[in-house]
Amino acid sequence: MIIPVRCFSCGKAYLWERYLKLLEDGVAEGDAMDQLGCKRYCCRRMLMTHVDLIEKLLRYNPAERNRNIR
């Protein structure tokens, strides 16, 4: 949900924004991670499997939902 800052396994920090920029530029996922110096399987897992849901969750407001029910 929240952008990963460090690998959960080894603690290496990496740059999520640079990774997304490379993907937007048309670089393949594996090549983008190689360019960032992400060689370990644990770090590659963190980048590849992250799903950024924070923007979707920010659209929901429980107070609005309760007001519409009444």
Image (tube, rainbow, N blue to C red):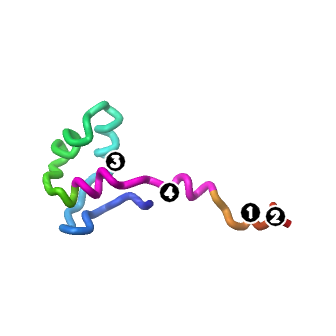
Q: Which residue is drawn at 33% across and 54% down?
A: 49
| Disc with the residue nearer the chain's start (4 vs 3) | 3
Could you say where residue 14 lies in the image, as x and y percent from the top left? 24, 56
Q: Do the residues labelled 2 and 1 touch (CB within 8 Å)?
A: yes
Question: Viewer-proximal residue, 36 or 70?
Answer: 70
Q: Is mark 4 on a helix, strand or loop?
A: helix
How far is mark 4 from mark 2, CA to CA? 25 Å
Q: How many labels does the image show?
A: 4
| Disc with the residue nearer the chain's start (3 vs 1) | 3
Q: Which residue is drawn at 17% across and 56% down?
A: 41
Q: Do the residues labelled 2 and 3 touch (CB within 8 Å)?
A: no
Where is the C terminus found, in terms of image quarters?
bottom right
Q: What residue type is labelled 4?
A: Ile
| Disc with the residue nearer the chain's start (1 vs 4) | 4
The residue that mark 1 highlights is 65
Where is the N terminus found, in terms of image quarters?
bottom left
Q: Which residue is drawn at 28% across and 52% down?
A: 15
Query: Tag on residue 1?
Result: none
Query: Tag on residue 54?
Result: 4
- Circle 2 or circle 3, nearest the eye: 2
| Disc with the residue nearer the chain's start (4 vs 2) | 4
* The magenta segment: 44-59
How far is mark 2 from mark 1, CA to CA? 7 Å
Query: Tag on residue 69?
Result: 2
